Amino acid sequence: MGRIFGTDGVRGIANVYPMTTEMAMQLGRGAAHIFKNKHRRPKIVIGKDTRLSGYMIENAIASGICSMGVDVLLVGPLPTPGIAFITSSMRADAGVVISASHNPFQDNGIKFFSRDGFKLPDELEEEIEELILSNGINHLRPTAEEVGKAFRIDDAVGRYVVFLKNSFPRDLTLDGIKIAVDCAHGAAYKVAPAVFEELGAEVALTGVKPNGQNINAGCGSLYPEVVAKLVVESGAHIGVAFDGDGDRLICADEKGRVLDGDHLMAVCAAHMLREKRLNHSTLVTTVMSNMGLEVALRSRGGCLERTAVGDRYVVERMRAGGFNLGGEQSGHVIFLDYNTTGDGILSALRLLEVMLLQGKPLSELAAIMERYPQHLINVRVKERKPLDAVPEIARTVRLVEEKLGDHGRVLIRPSGTEPVIRVMVEGRDRDLVVGLAQETAAVIERAMS
């Protein structure tokens, strides 16, 4: 049996290892043991997206938790950030999200939040994994009144809607604003329309009829052209597209132009700089964010810090450095003044707030960032050697950096899951970028074949 946890919890094809009901029960038992509170009756929140397999995994993990003498609070389909919020606000000992985010419906996943609403650090995931692999808690079997109970929290959606509405300034309203909304037939399908409508907006909806199999299918943040088209057809002021678990946001402006997480962060970071609300005048993002974001921020007196790819690494750096805004190009944007994780609906509200306060359309706001051309090549290799141990690669990278100067960069990183080296070159001149990326990829292929 190999490693269970990946870069964002446990994920795979539902009913195939490791995403089996047997493993879900074991994960429930392991998490319950880790989070068991010795001073009171412990409780763990479980929420999910709209996948068909969510029912069986939910029941299995709830059984595992109850078998360890811990109570379960079932909230049903709710965006991942909503589950983080409910976990924290109900003073639960932990939260569980059953979702595979933007993956197709046949996949599923399990990830955990601690009682403060933040994702678990690697050390705690490893502790749960070790308990499972070592059979270290097989002998722990509470009986009689010590067995846990399961309760359904019927008003979880309402609680989360109120939380999101309260994050929007009371002196602002969405009256007269039309929003095109694509919920990807996922976890945001009830919450997002309710929030926007209750704040006064008119909404044009798509992706709000989940059937267990249509989550992320040709819709949502992976297919932003759908909401972009809806914006144009409906005459909306903005289009917002979420992924299956509602923690990502991709937008379209009033002209139907798609804007990713980098544009969203550029607009919000610039506004927060202007309002002196961006902690340490710094935005935290990953190595994959476009250099145009860095240039836009720097020209306004701000700074940008980069982390490894993954929203958990962004959050870790934000917490360590006292920063309050960070995110990824993919649309995970974290406003730590409001929530502990990426929240697509909350991100949309922050963007709408800027539009209203500055009295400008989204297309004008987003124009502060000029996207630099990026060219990405995946090089399949026979043997994954440490990159710094291959002199030819280091020499090529130095030469590429010299040619790009201050107006570009090169990024080489190995895939964490397959024998692939990812080469990304970025700069102002598209032809130069493509040529340098091809040249670098060819050197890596020769050196590592």
Image (tube, grey):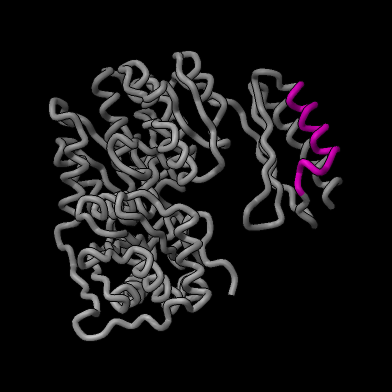
For the stretch drawn in magenta, what is the main secondary structure? helix
The reply, left or right, for residue 70 in relation to residue 119 is: left
- Report the residue at 22% width, 63% height from top: 39
Answer whether residue 264 is visible to the viewer in this image.
no
Numbered disc total: 0
* Front residue of 4 and 37: 37
> Could you tell me which residue is drawn at 27 percent across and 71 percent down?
70
Q: Is residue 41 magenta?
A: no
Rendered location of residue 136, percent (x, y) = 47, 76
Viewer-side residue, 379 vs 395: 395
Tell me where residue 333 appears, x and y as whole percent.
40, 38
Name the residue rendered at 30%, 19% in the picture: 360
Q: Which residues are the magenta region?
A: 386-402
Q: Residue furthest front?
A: 39
On the picture, is 356 further left or further right than 2? left
Relative to 358, residue 47 above or below: below
**The N terminus appears in which quarter of the rendering?**
bottom right
In the rendered view, would you say 57 is above or below 254? Answer: below
Comparing 25 with 261, the one in front is: 25
Asked whether 405 or 364 is in front, the reply is 405
- The quarter of the picture where residue 30 lies is bottom left
Tell me which corner region of the image, top left, top right, bottom left or bottom right, holds residue 365.
Answer: top left
Q: Is residue 143 above or below residue 390?
A: below
Along the horizontal axis of the image, is 143 left or right of 384? left
Q: Residue at x 85, y 38 (%)?
A: 391
The image shows residue 431, relative to residue 342, as above or below, that is: above
Q: Position of residue 2 (x, y in %)?
A: 59, 70
User: Is residue 283 at least partly visible in the picture?
Assistant: yes
